[in-house]
Image (cartoon, coloured by chain):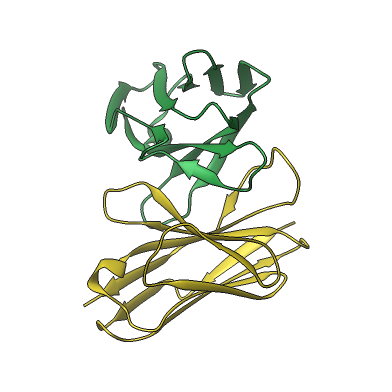
């Protein structure tokens, strides 16, 4: 069976510090991978998605970047965090092909102080 | 531009009754729709989906209805249980893309 991992579960960082959140998927190959953010009281905002190694599509111009160094690894990064980067970050995956459900990881709660 | 809208931020229902959660969308290019349930500090859990070629899909207590002409879908939960209390998100995928657009969520509270 497939599983998706995210770490860390919670993170408190000062403004201006760097960020690296990691997501890995097990039990599948060539998944489509996604990063979302849920701000307090808001919906899920799509940040990045990737259909293959090294292929990143950015949805929202912002202070964040994403990379996919391996097939089942997706990393969300920032060089300098802003207060507005606080939120709940979710990684998700879908199998390749049409009409597929999207499965989510447990999420990372990021607080920027 | 919110392409997927959940206009009711919250809903309260008595245990055993039907819960109806609504979702509207604006883009006629959406061809696949999904509903998720989310507890605080956890990732969303997939509930049920429907393709645009269908108008109904049922799975146990959960039924999703799609009205393409009205660009509207709804999730029915019958009977509602206290454990169903959570935030429910609808999502839509644009045809030919890998992007999923989520609504802002509806908080369901099932009263015992």
Horizontal and vertical percent for residue B13? 31, 22
Horizontal and vertical percent for residue A53? 71, 71
Horizontal and vertical percent for residue B60? 61, 24
Task: Name the foreground residue: A27 vs A97.
Answer: A97
**Residue A6 against residue B68 in the figure, above or below:** below
Residue B102, image quadrant? top left
Quarter containing the N terminus of chain A = bottom right
Task: Name the foreground residue: B23 vs B70.
Answer: B70
Q: Please identify which colour was used for chain A in the image.
A: yellow
Left or right relative to A60: residue A85: left
Quarter containing the C terminus of chain A = bottom left
Task: Name the foreground residue: B58 vs A47.
Answer: A47
Chain displayed in green: B
Q: Going 42% across and 36% down the picture, which residue do you hit?
A: B83
**Residue B22 against residue A83 in the figure, above or below:** above
Left or right relative to B99: residue A63: left
User: Among all residues in the image, which is located at the extreme bottom?
Assistant: A17
């Amino acid at each position: 069976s497939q599983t998706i991992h995210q770490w860390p579960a919670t993170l408190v960082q000062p403004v201006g510090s760097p960020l690296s959140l990691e997501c890995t998927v097990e039990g599948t190959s060539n998944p489509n991978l996604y990063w979302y953010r849920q701000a307090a009281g808001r919906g899920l905002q799509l940040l990045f998605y990737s259909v293959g190694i090294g292929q990143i599509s950015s949805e929202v111009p912002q202070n964040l970047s994403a990379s996919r160094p391996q097939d089942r690894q997706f990393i969300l990064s920032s060089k300098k965090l802003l207060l507005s980067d606080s939120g709940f970050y979710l990684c998700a995956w879908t199998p390749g092909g049409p009409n597929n459900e999207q499965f989510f990881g447990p999420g990372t709660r990021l607080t920027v102080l | 531009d919110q392409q997927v809208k959940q206009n009711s931020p919250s809903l309260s229902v008595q245990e055993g009754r039907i819960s109806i959660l609504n979702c509207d969308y604006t883009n006629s290019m959406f061809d696949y729709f999904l509903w998720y349930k989310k507890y605080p500090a956890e990732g969303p859990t997939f509930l049920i989906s429907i393709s645009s070629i269908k108008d109904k899909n049922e799975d146990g207590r959960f039924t999703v209805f799609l009205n393409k002409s009205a660009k509207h879908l709804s999730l029915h939960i019958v009977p509602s249980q206290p454990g169903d209390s959570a935030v429910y998100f609808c999502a839509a995928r644009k045809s030919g893309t890998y992007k999923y657009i989520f609504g802002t969520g509806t908080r369901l509270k099932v009263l015992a």
